[in-house]
Image (cartoon, rainbow, N blue to C red):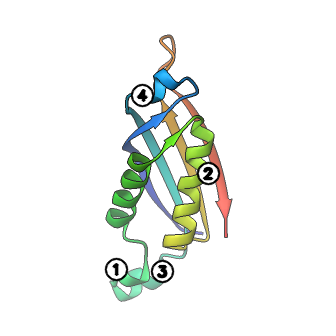
């Protein structure tokens, strides 16, 4: 299966177990891997036959900014649902990175969901 990749999309979200952590929005990074056939879009040179990654990016950024979650696992699951329901790939893999530990570059969850 072909893939569209978005690497390190910046999200601003309220996420964290303690209330104090969720009190202020924080920067997260999202890697998106969409699985879908790209040959029809390539053959026709028609955006309508693929996924508009600009539109997808704006939707994910907006969704993350609108809510509040205790776990990045929950946010990742909700983002995957948005992708599958609104953009219709065969599958999506998301890696959601959070910059919270002082002695680590980041922590992350990675999930893969299929239609």
Q: Report the residue at 43% width, 54% height from top.
A: 63
* Image label count: 4
Q: Which residue is mark 4?
A: 23
Classify the position of the C terminus by image quarter: bottom right
**CA separation in Å, label 4 and label 1:** 40 Å
**CA separation in Å, label 2 and label 4:** 22 Å
Disc 1 crowd rating (10 Å Cα; few below 14, some 14-19, many 20+) is few
* SS at circle 2: helix
Question: In the rendered structure, which disc, 4 or 1, sits on the residue that comes first in sequence?
Answer: 4
- Picture layout, residue 19 above or below residue 61: above
Numbered disc in front, either 4 or 3: 4
Q: Report the residue at 41% width, 82% height from top.
A: 41
Instruction: Return the residue nearer the eye: 84 or 45.
Output: 84
Question: In the rendered structure, which disc, 4 or 3, sits on the residue that comes first in sequence?
Answer: 4
**CA separation in Å, label 4 and label 3:** 45 Å
Q: Residue 80 in the image: x percent, y percent?
A: 57, 57
Q: Which residue is mark 2?
A: 77
Numbered disc in front, either 4 or 1: 4
């Amino acid at each position: 299966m072909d893939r569209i990749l978005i690497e390190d999309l910046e999200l601003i979200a309220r996420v964290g177990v303690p209330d104090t952590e969720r009190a202020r929005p924080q920067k997260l990074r999202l890697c998106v891997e969409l699985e879908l056939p790209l040959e029809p879009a390539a053959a026709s040179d028609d955006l309508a036959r693929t996924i508009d990654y600009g539109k997808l990016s704006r939707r994910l950024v907006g969704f993350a900014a609108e809510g509040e979650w205790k776990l990045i696992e929950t946010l990742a699951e909700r983002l995957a649902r948005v992708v599958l329901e609104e953009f219709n790939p065969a599958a999506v893999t998301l890696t959601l990175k959070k910059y919270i530990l002082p002695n680590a570059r980041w922590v992350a969850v990675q999930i893969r969901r299929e239609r």
